[in-house]
Amino acid sequence: MSKEEQNNHDETNQNPQEPTISRRYFLAGSACLSVATAVSLSPLLNAEEVPSSEDLIQKHYKELSTEEKKEIFAKLESEINQQYGVTAKISDPAPLDGVEFAYVLNLGRCIGCRKCVYACMDENNQSRSPQKQYIRVMKMKKGTINLETSSHDYPEKEASSKDHFYMPVACQQCREPKCIEVCPVKATWKEKDGIVVVDYNWCIGCRYCEAACPYHARRFNFAKPQIPKQEINPDMGYLSNRPRYMGVMEKCTFCLHKTRRGEYPSCMEVCPTGSRKFGNIRDPESEVRKIIEQERVFVLKQEVGTLPKFYYTFAK
Amino acid sequence: MGNNGKKTHFEQGEFWKKVILPGTVILLLFFIFWGDSKPPIPSPVPLNAEWYSPETARGEILVNTVMPGNCFICHSVQIPDPTTISPQFAHITVKLEHGVNDRCYNCHHIYDRDSLAGDGESKISFATPERLCARCHGIIVRDWKDGTHGLRQGGWLVKGGKDPVNFTCTECHDPHTPQFKYMHAAPAPTWPEKTLRQSRQSDDDPKSAFLTESIQERF
């Protein structure tokens, strides 16, 4: 040891411009650094969702053949069974021909009871903790639609106030969706019936779409979604309400696993005042079409040019 | 380090002693004790079924479903008075707050307990209350027939889908006090505070009042 130090000392004296590091300090330092790196990376060992090799080579949803879809759905079903102990059925109904979904909400009737919010959570297997909700009910003073000063965390006793009206805002299913334009990996797109969907297995979680959406309609899973086992809805759609992963975006899909079978979305079925109306805008006999023809409807943030298919009205 | 060959501030090995080693130890301590100090995510709480059931808001029909007793014990003896305003005796629980429509026999048939009053002497069955309501609220009933008024369940696509479930007038509105009663609302979201739109920025602050007034002045 002393020899080594001596050598080092000699070297230092010989070449003062190039100070060398002794082996001892080098080893000590590198050992410390490597331990620190290992400790700082150790949380990765506890990572809950490590993708399997099959997940990594899975193709984009649009490139999947029917057989591949079947395999993937079976795999997802077994994963869900393992994770939640629920026998789920993942379906993937195709968009119907000649159908374009639209929504009309009568603000004159909405009482801000937030039943739609929780029915949506129940139907769409949304994370209970941390809480995720697609619908935000904005409480606004009567006289103007002022989103800047609205609140959506009003306590339940402030619902149905006579001085306010309540504007539930969820995904507006735009005809010109800004969220799909910014997606760098095309993990979100607009379906033929006008519903904007996300492939949770393709999303990389960059949150560009969340920033691009003028309605703050997209939600990001910062943590692994937690749902009580008894509350899992076993009727799942691949593009809609199957359990999400940590680190992916999610959004309202008009309950496409239900609506593409001809049913109403959940938020509409629970609305006690009937302010929500849903239907096929291309069908001249449909409810939404009649309201749009008879009443004065407006869309939210018309000036941003997203052409939403979610209309608001102040009908009686 | 030094260009002129002098001994620098850090002598040989001192850089390691004074910077790297203590730094690494501090880093280690930081990662061990504070690195994973995020607050734990609380375990999920099941949703209350009342929060997403429409029944809690439209239970009005239950008020009037059962009227105990035999109607004829009283109504065969008493001669009906068409100007009767307040519900009496057995019907004391009924509160009539239907605007200007404040007489019992405007809607109930005066000689038949099991029917509602139609035009003239005609009768309307209790099963089709919308025919009675349409005598005054025609536009609403038209909208209801179109499907644009009131709650609907089931399916939008009749063919191949679920059967649509429609609700008649009295299944949501209490005909005696028809103004909608708001019973139970669901609680506010429990999101992280920074993602909530706080009430303090809400419509009570001066900026909002200014905006509201200035917009109202324009119209």
Image (cartoon, helix red, strand yellow):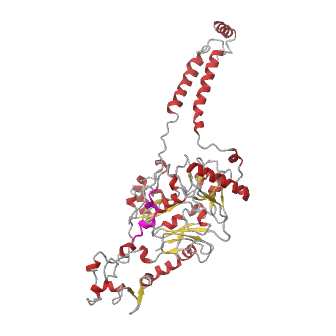
The residue closer to the viewer here, A131 or A139, is A131
Is residue B2 placed above or below B152 in the rendered structure?
above
Residue B121 picture quarter: bottom left
Query: Dividing the image into 4 quarters, which one contains the N terminus of chain A?
Result: top right
Q: Name the residue located 56 percent from the left edge and 51 percent from the top edge.
A: A85
Can you give x and y, in whole percent of width and height, for residue A40 in the image?
58, 32
Can you give x and y, in whole percent of width and height, for residue B19 in the image?
57, 21
The total of numbered circles placed on residues is 0
Q: Give left or right: position of B72 versus A66.
A: left
Can you give x and y, in whole percent of width and height, for residue A135 in the image?
51, 59
Specify the farthest residue to the bottom.
B121
Q: Give left or right: position of A255 versus A54.
A: left
Q: Evaluate whether residue A122 shows in this view.
A: yes
Q: Give left or right: position of B188 versus A174.
A: left
Is residue A218 placed above or below B114 in the rendered structure?
above
Q: Evaluate whether residue B103 shows in this view.
A: no
Query: Does the segment drawn in magenta span residue B128?
Result: no
Is residue A304 placed above or below B65 in the rendered structure?
above
Can you give x and y, in whole percent of width and height, for residue B82 in the image?
30, 89
The residue closer to the viewer here, A27 or A119, is A119
Residue B103 picture quarter: bottom left
Is residue A151 placed above or below A51 in the rendered structure?
below
Range of residues picked out in magenta: B47-59
Q: Name the residue located 63 percent from the left edge and 51 percent from the top edge.
A: A78
